Image (tube, coloured by chain):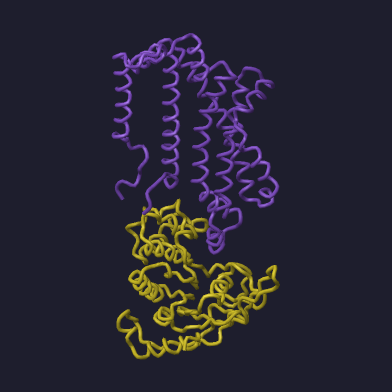
Amino acid sequence: MSQPVFQCRSASVTLSLSSGPRPIISGINLDVHDAEFLSIVGPSGTGKTTLLRVLGGLLPPTSGEMLIKGRVMTGPPDDVVIVFQDYGNALLQWRTVAGNVAFGIERKLSRAECADRVNDALNLVGLLVRAGDYPWQLSGGMQQRVQIARALALRPAVMLMDEPFAALDAMTKASLQDELLRLRDRTRTSFVFITHDIEEAIYLGDRVAVLNGSPGRIDEVIPIELPGPRDQIVTRALPEFLKYRYRLHEAIGHG
Amino acid sequence: MGSRWTTLSVNWSGLSVFALVLAGWEAAVRSGMIAFEFLPAPSAILMGVVELVQDGILLQDLLHTLLSIAIGWTIAMIIGVAVGLLLGFSPLARKYGLASIEVLRPIPGIAFAPLGLLLFGFSLQTELVVTVLPTVWPVMVNTMGGIANAQPRLTDVGRTFRLSSYEIVRYLLLPSALPSIVVGARISLGLALVMAIVAEIVGNPEGLGYGIVREQQALHPEYMFAYIAVVGLLGVILNAGVLAITKSLWPWTAPRQSA
């Protein structure tokens, strides 16, 4: 396999609390390859959000290091961007949809270039016709699409997503899952997708990493060899899908 | 999208109730059902307004009150926003400053009128002391709250898009606090009108407030009520004006129904 685009080398985070040091995640090793979809699944309390903040450069690890395209990260790097779960707080309520999508690029690009990229990104998520609306005029699923478009406009190498569909209903969730896979195929972006939903992790992932324990560790990364393109009905009914589901439940300790 | 904007639409059913009350009042006075010596009918009050306008004195008084509101409110906004931002951004400032604010804030502004009179006599300065002191609090407290309660998530967003700390404040935290600052500014403006009138009644023989007292002492109740009506109308117009201006400058700060 080629050189990974994004690497996490034995990263640990220990918070110093008044009650003493508390380890949150410990010895995390991850490789993310070009255009790969890596799911990270784990029960609550295993440090999923902490891990994502480390991967996104928002939180420096207590020990270990992060590499993006072979360079050591010292903060949020140019090629990595985070999509948050709470779109209501993460979107700029005072800007239109187009204004939100332009937010990450408008200070770096010329006006024309910026407008082009905003159009492309909105087109990719199917929201071009709502460019002039405000976020509060959109449904939850559309608002999350705006956040995804805002990240895409940056043309990142890696997109980090922290349970992005947890607040959405099942049907919206399914259509956004398929949209993400399409986006990956069209833009060749790598995805790191954190979720507590095992089926979602399998459906989307090329590999699924299992985060478990306290402090959270990754003991197992399971390659998912399901045929593509994936389909909400067919893929989820495959015997292999059910086998992966069984195996992941076991790995998490539901077995 | 349709009817999302609820401001500035005229509430006709509400106005018709008000008109009915006026009509009842008019009928009661004319028929002699109520016969206080100094309670004029609405029509007489309206005539009073017309006469005061023709005389020119109403305009002069109105301009004075508007001027003192403008000066007082501007001073209060500058102090309130500046101190509010400091308190919002700095936990240290909150730790040392909030206690003083909580002690000073409940003091009614009018309690400072004797102080103003002692320092400045019957003057515009006294009026400003009475107007500015209580008017500072709503905008200060709302500015502080707007900044301190800004979503921590917005800072994450700024960082993942590689903004500097200055840019995070400028492009994320200040705009997110703006609706709260605008609400504070509107409350302050309403209060500035009240305090200017009060100050003119007790401390500065000029303006609409003094007009009320002057006509009362001259035993001209229809003129006195005319001044009261103009003050009421001014309050409505100022509030609607601020709403309209902020709505056109920053549409997202306007009151709205949730999507």
For the residue pair A146 and B134, the one nearer the viewer reads as B134
- The spot of residue B27 in percent (x, y) is 29, 18
Q: Relative to residue B81, is residue B229 drawn left or right? A: left
- The spot of residue B92 in percent (x, y) is 69, 51
Q: Which chain is rendered purple in the image?
A: B
Q: Is residue B37 above or below residue A127?
A: above
- The spot of residue A63 in percent (x, y) is 67, 77
Q: Relative to residue A143, is residue A7 drawn left or right? A: right
For the residue pair A247 and B32, the one nearer the viewer reads as B32
Kindly indicate the quadrant of the structure image that contains residue B46: top left
Q: Which chain is rendered yellow in the image?
A: A
Q: Relative to residue A240, is residue B31 drawn left or right? A: left
How many circles with numbers are drawn on the protein?
A: 0
For the residue pair B158 and A242, the one nearer the viewer reads as A242
Q: Is residue A234 above or below residue A77?
A: below
Q: Is residue A103 above or below residue A224?
A: above
Q: Relative to residue B114, is residue B156 drawn left or right? A: left
Kindly indicate the quadrant of the structure image that contains residue B40: top left
Q: Residue at x 45, y 57 (%)?
A: A102
Farthest residue to the front: give it: B33
- The spot of residue B148 in percent (x, y) is 58, 52
Q: Is residue B169 above or below residue B160?
A: above
